[in-house]
Amino acid sequence: MRKEELIAFENSSTKLNKEKKEKPSFNFEEYKSIIYTALFYSFGLFIGAYFYKISSSETLDLLLKPEEQSVISLFISNFCIYFSLFVLVVFLGFCLIGYPIINIIPTVIGIVTGIKSAYLYINFSEKGIGYSLIMLIPYVALLLTVLAFTINLSSTLSKKLINITKNTDEPIELDVKPYIRKYLVLALCIMITTLIEACLTSLLFTVVAI
C-alpha cells in the first residue's frame, strides 16, 4: 500500500472512530420524568377501566354520557379542569414534597380516561372504540404531552430545592425566572390545546355521535 493510501486509510479510520464516540446516546436521566409520566398514566388507565367494570351503574353512565355543548362552554369547562391540573403541577414544583408525589397527576388523568374508555367500549362496542379514537384519545394525548413537560420541569425545580435545603454549609441562590418563562409557555400550550379540543369536539360531535 502506498504511503498516500495508508495516510488516507488512517485518517478515515480516525474520523470513523471519532464519529462513533460523538454519536449521541439516550440519556435516561434527562427523560426519566417523562417516561415515569407515561408509566403512571398507563397504570391509571388500567385502574380506571377496572373501576368502571366493577362499579358501573345507571347513575355513573349518566355522568359519563357525552353531551353536545357549544365551543365556548366546552372551552371554559375543559380549560378550568386542565389549567387547575397545570397549576397543581406548578405548585408541586415549588414544594419540597413535590418531586415524590407529582406523578399522582398523570395517574388521575389515566384513571378518568380509563373510566371513560371502558364506558364507551362496554356500552357501544365498536362505535365506542371509534368515538374514543376520534373524540377522546387525541385530546388526552395533547394534554398529557404538555403536562409531561410541565412535570419534568417541576420535578427538576423540586429536586433543586431539596438539594438547597440539604446544603447547609453555604447559601445557594436559585434563579426561578427561567422556570417561570417556561411555565408561561406551557400555560399557553394548555390554552391552545383546550381551544383545539373545544373546536374539533363541537365540530365532530354531530358526525361521530353515539
Image (tube, helix red, strand yellow):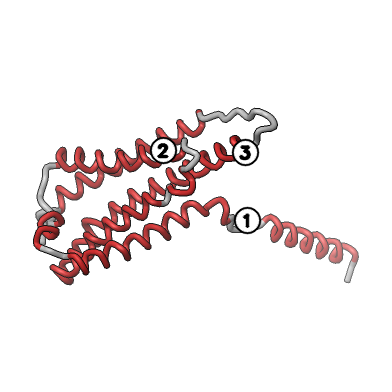
Give the image location of residue 180, x and y in percent. 46, 31
Which residue bears the numbered disc 3?
Answer: 166
- Residue positioned most to the right: 3
Q: Can you identify the residue that label 2 sits on?
A: 90
**Residue type beneath disc 2:** Val
Q: Which residue is mark 1?
A: 24
| Circle nearer the viewer, 1 or 3 | 3
Who's the residue at 20% across and 44% down the image? 198
Q: Amino acid at mark 1?
A: Pro
> Which label's residue is closer to the chain start, 1 or 3?
1
> Within 10 Å of the Cα at label 3, are there few (<14), some (14-19), or many (20+) other Cα atoms?
few
The residue carrying pointer 2 sits among few (fewer than 14), some (14 to 19) or many (20 or more) residues within 10 Å by Cα, namely: many
Q: Earlier in the sequence, mark 3 or mark 2?
A: 2
In the structure shown, which secondary structural element does the residue marked by tag 3 occupy?
A: helix
- The image shows residue 62, relative to residue 160, as above or below, that is below
Q: Is residue 129 visible?
A: no
Q: Is residue 5 left or right of residue 107?
A: right
Question: Distance of mark 1 from mark 3, alpha carbons?
Answer: 33 Å
The quadrant of the rendering that contains the N terminus is bottom right
The image shows residue 166 at horizontal and vertical percentages of 62, 38
Q: Amino acid at mark 3?
A: Lys
For mark 1, give the secondary structure. loop
Residue 97 can be seen in this image: yes
Nearest the camera: 192 or 118?
A: 118
